[in-house]
Amino acid sequence: MPSRFLFLALVLGVSAAVTNFTPAVAQDRSIVVASTTSTQDSGLFGYLLPLFKAKAGIDVKVIAQGTGQALDTARRGDADVVFVHAKPQEEKFLAEGFGMKRFDVMYNDFVLIGPKSDPAGVRGKDIETALKAIQSKAAPFVSRGDKSGTHSAELALWKQAGIDIATAKGPWYREIGQGMGAALNTAAAMNGYVLADRGTWISFKNRGDLEIVVEGDKRLFNQYGVMLVNPEKFPSVKKELGQSFIDWLISAEGQAAIAGYKIDGQQLFFPNAEKKAS
Amino acid sequence: MSDQFSAWQLILNGDAALFAIVRLSLAVSLSAVALAALAGMPLGALLALTRFPGRSALVVVLNALMGLPPVVVGLAVYLLLSRSGPLGEMGILFTPSAMVIAQTILIAPIIAALTRQTVEDLWAEYRDELTAMDVSPAGRMTTLLWDARYSLLTALLAGFGRAAAEVGAVMIVGGNIDGFTRTMTTAVALETSKGNLPLAMGLGLVLVAIVLAINAAAWGTRVWSERQTG
């Protein structure tokens, strides 16, 4: 009869043997940072976090979501720090009392990506003219459609171009509801236009026939900010550890690290934290 | 994992990050299989051997639950484990434990439903004998589960296959955190979104190879143990 249970014991034993995870529970010096797909897909975190870990001994666990979703994750108390790029949404988050002080960290810019053949004829134009041309020619355009920072910026740009995208959109306007990389993959597959942050574009590998068609317009500025989630709302927030990550990001050392992240010699993000008076 | 490498180079070089990902995937999915088996097998056997009003409806529901969408299970577990949810105090959202819970919920119905069918079929064969020998209900259950063990291995493998292949649930409750909750499937999703399609495909093939190896090992165990017991 004992052999009868040998079989089940074997199955359970095998799984128990490989199950001893969570090695760092004893002394948990880690924080959860809700951030955006652009900071992860561009490889910035892969470069920054080991530097911070070496300096402070703190593990940073990054959940990469769109800005809107990242802020919602923090609103539920499931993150210690948010690191995103949509100032109006961030200010609303602060006004609701979910965040402590907001710090500027760095910027890059958005670029309009499109097929080399440029069917809407927008190359070199300013962003307003370009969007108007895309809409009037009904050229394929991929929208993130996920309330991310890039999506917010895109909606604001349509508005500035005098186009009410909610009524103007047709089959040419594809809302995919996914991250930056997925939007670029989709644009590459359908040879469409797409608004992207430069960092993700530079690091993106599956470009197909796409290239930058509009850049350098000052309306394409893309600011990143960081905030500690309010510990009064959620006592589980790791205040000290989270704040030390923020302090490092805006310190001279952290800022230099951000400036030092390059792909093929191109800098992806430009630090612009306020210099401390001390 | 460096982007310049292909998946095969990562394997050949014994890439530590890749092995950590493989190990986590296996640990999470095998744990889920073990827990789901502990719950699902007795439940399936019980359902096979008892008769009560509404039983047919329950069987239909159980069979339907085999089609639970991973992303829905993930969302439900997320809402439960979130700091704002009823179990938020546990603080296990975005950890491997949360991933095990989600996958257990996902595959317990698969194991229970397949066990129910297997045991019920075997019961039809054994009924007269077990009734004549006046075996207790608990004794019937263990006898049938034991004698059906090789068929039930397939139920476990079906559960494992589902757990190892899904991305929706572990992505939501694990968060795809580098070095902590990143599994084979979420790594494939991430590399795809980075436009790193060859590496993503390579990782996918590694996953398929591992699932194949585990199925081969299970088959080998079965053959070996059939020889032992004659």
Image (cartoon, grey):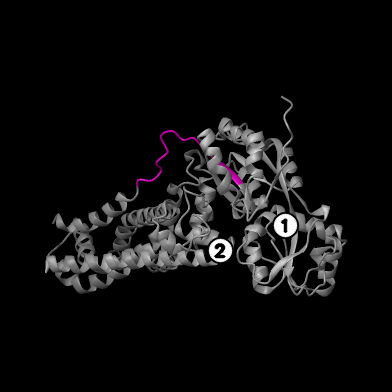
Q: Chain of mark 1?
A: A
In the image, farthest residue toward the front: A265
Circle 2 residue = B196
Q: Chain of mark 2?
A: B
- Circle 2 Cα neighbour tier, 10 Å, few/some/many (<14 / 14–19 / ≥20): many
Residue at (65% x, 39% y) in the render: A256
Q: Quadrant of the N terminus of chain A?
A: bottom left
The percent position of residue B51, horizontal first and vertical second, equals 31, 65
Q: In what element is the residue under mark 1?
A: helix
Magenta segment main secondary structure: loop
The percent position of residue A46, horizontal first and vertical second, equals 55, 48
- Circle 1 Cα neighbour tier, 10 Å, few/some/many (<14 / 14–19 / ≥20): many
Q: Amino acid at mark 1?
A: His
Q: Is residue B155 visible?
A: no
Please state which of residues A255 and B56 is positioned toward the viewer in this rendering. A255
Write down the quadrant of residue B216 in the picture.
bottom left
Q: In what element is the residue under mark 2?
A: loop
Q: Which residues are magenta?
A: A20-34
Circle 1 residue = A151
Write down the quadrant of residue B132 in the picture.
bottom left
Q: Is residue A26 magenta?
A: yes
Q: Nearer the viewer, mark 1 or mark 2?
A: 2
Please state which of residues B171 and A51 is positioned toward the viewer in this rendering. A51
Residue at (78% x, 75% y) in the render: A119
The percent position of residue A13, horizontal first and vertical second, equals 26, 52
Write down the quadrant of residue A25 in the picture.
top left
| A203 relative to A50 in the view: left or right | right
Residue at (30% x, 60% y) in the render: B41
- CA separation, marks 1 and 2? 23 Å
Q: Quick check: A120 above or below B18?
A: below
